[in-house]
Image: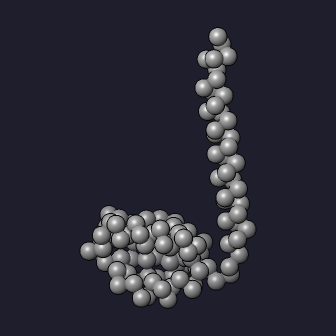
Amino acid sequence: MAWIQKKPIFAILLFSMVLFTIVSLLFANEQITSTDSTRHRYIITLHQNTTKEHMEEMEDTLIGLGAVIIHKYTIVMKGWAVEMSDSLVSSLEEDESVESFMQIPHK
């Protein structure tokens, strides 16, 4: 009877260990592949009339292209602090919803 009561705990522990392993592997892979020396940090500001849906689409696109979202701004302004390769800057210049972007120093 005691084994039946402990079985859910075992399942939770096993799930946690598997999840931790997967996250660790993904993070390690990101560290290994992020050797692009032309990566910088930027503040990207969107126009205030940019919809939430479009902002989410842009965020998914940035992440898909290798950008790392450091912070998301939604209250005072719309935009992000990101770390990305310089090659993504030109595509941001073409997006009509981008009001401005500024390179910020790396700590």
- Quadrant for residue 79, please give it: bottom left
State the residue at coordinates (68%, 72%): 34
| Image quarter hosting the N terminus | top right
In the rendered image, which quarter contains the C terminus?
bottom right
65 with respect to 77 (left or right): right
- The relative height of residue 17 versus residue 102 in the rendered view (above or below) is above
Residue drawn at 37 percent across, 70 percent down: 55
**Looking at this view, is 97 or 82 the one in front?**
97
Work out whether 5 lies above or below 94.
above
Q: Is residue 13 left or right of 92 when viewed as pictured? A: right
Color scheme of the displayed model: one colour
Q: Is residue 83 visible?
A: no
- Seen from the viewer's position, the closer of residues 22 and 48 is 22
Give the side of residue 56 with respect to residue 5, left or right. left
The residue sitting at 70% across, 56% down in the picture is: 25
Does residue 26 sit above or below 18 in this rendering?
A: below
Measuring from the top left, give residue 26's x and y in whole percent.
Answer: 66, 58
Residue 29, percent across and down?
A: 70, 63
Task: Give the camera-side residue of 99 and 30.
Answer: 30
Q: Is residue 54 visible?
A: yes
Q: Is residue 50 left or right of residue 15?
A: left
Place of residue 63 in the rendered image (x, y in percent of width and height, measured from the top left): 53, 69
Q: Residue furthest right?
A: 32
> Residue at 57% across / 86% down in the picture?
87
Image height of 27 relative to 17, above or below:
below
Image location of residue 47, percent across then percent down: 31, 78
Count of residue discs = 0
Q: Quadrant of residue 84?
A: bottom right
Residue, far left: 49
